[in-house]
């Protein structure tokens, strides 16, 4: 018999309580991306509502494609938001935008948003709406996210310069990351993206 004063080296095993299953998150299988690369399997995040900022640049279309994919995988609602900044109206200002030009500009923006909506719907996003806001871009995006607590992700694009400081500092993305009430995904343009036609 072992000495009572000597501890046994046998490890004790802990049984899992009966009736409680250990549930793992859904896993997305690894699939090729069409460019000769395959991404490792990752959990599908349960997003409910995604806000995607677009300014109709190539970088913002990369953000749009990313948000469409996330919305398709999680079944989340997707809101495409474009922010335009009206010129400052001052007396004797040459930057004053005439009412007819203002209306024409807004109509063009709404038309571009509808084309973007059609593209993300074609990519599988189940529920899509668009919003055209006027003001400072980062401030409008943060206020839009704060106005609706069901937003649980903001997706913004960046030019993708090397180094995180070059990517974020001084940009709209940086200010959104600093002030947003929910997580922010900064999407960098890596491959050729499709511009809505």
Image (spheres, rainbow, N blue to C red):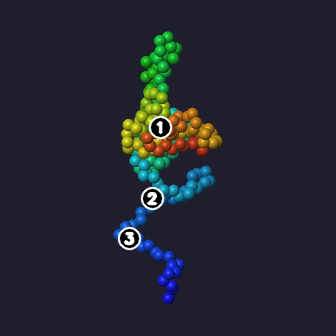
Label 1 sits on a secondary structure element that is helix
Vertical placement of residue 133 versus 77, above or below: above
How many residues crowd around disc 2 within 10 Å: few (fewer than 14), some, or many (20 or more)? few
- Please identify the residue farthest to the front as the structure is shown: 5
The mark found on residue 152 in the picture is none
The reply, left or right, for residue 54 in relation to residue 160 is left
Vertical placement of residue 154 versus 170, above or below: below
- Of the image marks 3 and 2, the number of the one nearer the N terminus: 3
Q: Nearer the viewer, mark 3 or mark 2?
A: 3
Q: Between marks 3 and 2, how big is the CA–CA gap?
A: 23 Å
Q: Between marks 1 and 2, how big is the CA–CA gap?
A: 31 Å
Which residue does the numbered mark 1 point to in the structure image?
179
Residue 85 shows up from this direction: yes
Label 3 sits on a secondary structure element that is loop
- Of the image marks 1 and 3, the number of the one nearer the N terminus: 3
- Please identify the residue farthest to the top as the structure is shown: 92
Does the CB distance between marks 3 and 2 fall below 8 Å? no
Q: Residue at 40%, 47% (x, y): give it.
A: 48
Q: Nearer the viewer, mark 1 or mark 2?
A: 1
The mark found on residue 26 in the picture is 2
Which residue does the numbered mark 3 point to in the structure image?
17
- Of the image marks 1 and 2, the number of the one nearer the N terminus: 2
Residue 8 shows up from this direction: no
- Please identify the residue farthest to the right as the structure is shown: 162
Q: Residue at 51%, 86% (x, y): give it.
A: 2
Q: Residue at 45%, 36% (x, y): give it.
A: 142
- Across and down, in percent, residue 112 comes to 47, 33
Does the CB distance between marks 1 and 2 fall below 8 Å? no
- Across and down, in percent, residue 162 comes to 64, 42
């Amino acid at each position: 018999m072992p000495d009572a004063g000597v501890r046994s080296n046998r490890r004790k095993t802990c049984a899992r309580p009966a009736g409680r299953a250990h549930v793992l998150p859904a896993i997305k299988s690894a699939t090729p991306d069409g460019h000769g690369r395959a991404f490792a399997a990752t959990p599908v995040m349960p997003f409910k509502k995604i806000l995607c900022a677009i300014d109709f640049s190539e970088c913002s279309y990369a953000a749009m494609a990313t948000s469409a994919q996330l919305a398709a995988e999680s079944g989340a609602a997707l809101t495409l938001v474009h922010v335009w900044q009206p010129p400052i109206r001052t007396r004797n200002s040459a930057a004053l935008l005439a009412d007819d030009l203002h209306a024409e500009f807004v109509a063009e923006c709404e038309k571009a948003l509808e084309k973007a909506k059609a593209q993300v719907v074609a990519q599988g996003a189940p529920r899509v709406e668009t919003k055209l806001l006027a003001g400072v871009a980062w401030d409008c995006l943060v206020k839009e996210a704060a106005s609706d607590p069901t937003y649980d992700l903001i997706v913004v694009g960046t030019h993708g310069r090397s180094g995180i400081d070059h990517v974020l500092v001084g940009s709209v993305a940086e200010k959104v990351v600093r002030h947003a009430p929910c997580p922010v995904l900064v999407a960098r343009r890596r491959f050729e993206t499709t511009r809505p036609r």
